Amino acid sequence: MASLIPRFEPMTMQETSRSRPTRHGEDHRITRTGWLRAAVLGANDGILSTASLILGVAAASSTPGAIFIAGVSGTVAGAMAMAAGEYVSVSSQSDTEKADLARERRELFDNADQELDELARIYAARGVDLDLARQVARQLMARDGLTAHARDELGISESTDAHPVQAALTSACAFSIGAAMPLIIAYAAPADSLAPFVSAASLAFLALLGAVGAWIGGASMTRGALRVIFWGAIAMALTSGIGKFFGSIV
């Protein structure tokens, strides 16, 4: 009976060079964290804050026109706040990274041998033999010591470095898109059923967003949808209750 295990004949050097891929083709999800975080946060905030604002104003017995104007105003203000907040936050991260890189650059210039030992100890702590770790550190520093220290000592790489403008624009656009959903429902829903329509539609949008965000990030879609529904329902219920309370006494 023939063996079921396939046999592999050794390849010649020419065949090996043809079969070897020219570049690393794996698509890791960590490379998406920058724009994914900003997009999911922006869209989630757009849906939730706009829907909550609409429900709060509607609970105070305002007219449909006033409710819609409040929603539009909240959308514009929220989008600008998200953009400004993301830009300031990520800029602070970028400034910190630049300061650390500048310090590392000076240390490489002033104490190259000490920095080589430091890099070797990092690799040795991860399980590499110390002599081999020193060889690896020496070769990496000969090629680009700053990049090696940035990646292995500081944890800064191309996939995780800060991009303030990208984060700001992504958050603002995502917020506006998310806010447009409850706004459209508020505009199209009957005046006497506005709150139930906006609540149900917004929770559905939040569930979809949570599931999609989890899917892109490689996590459980069910868990992603449930956690955003949970917090969204609490936020809308509280806002609606506050609007109803103050609407009855003002």
Image (cartoon, rainbow, N blue to C red):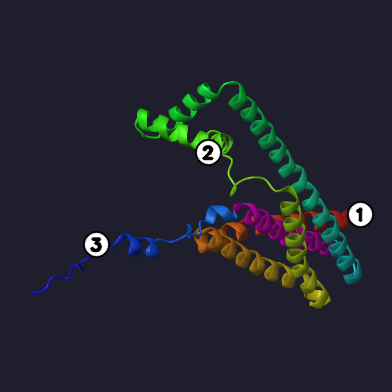
Magenta stretch in the rendered image: 33-59
Image side of residue 5 versus residue 93, left or right: left
Circle nearer the N terminus (2, 1): 2
The kind of residue tagged 1 is: Val
Residue 143 is tagged as 2
Say which residue label 1 marks.
250
Quadrant for the C terminus in the image: bottom right
User: Residue 185: where, in percent of width, then height?
Assistant: 77, 73
Type of the residue with mark 2: Arg
User: Of discs 1 and 3, which sits in the foreground?
Assistant: 3
Residue closest to the far front: 14
What amino acid is found at the position of numbered circle 3 in the picture?
Pro
Residue 16 locus on image (x, y percent)? 34, 61
For residue 10, the mark is 3
Magenta stretch contains residue 37: yes
Q: Secondary structure at mark 1?
A: loop
Q: Where is residue 35, by image quadrant?
A: bottom right
Could you tell me if the residues under marks 2 and 1 are in contact, i.e. CB atoms within 8 Å?
no
Distance from the alpha carbon under mark 2 to that under mark 1: 70 Å
* Residue under the point 72% across and 58% down: 170
- Residue 61 visible in image: no
Q: Is residue 35 left or right of residue 24?
A: right
Tell me if I can see residue 210 in this picture.
yes
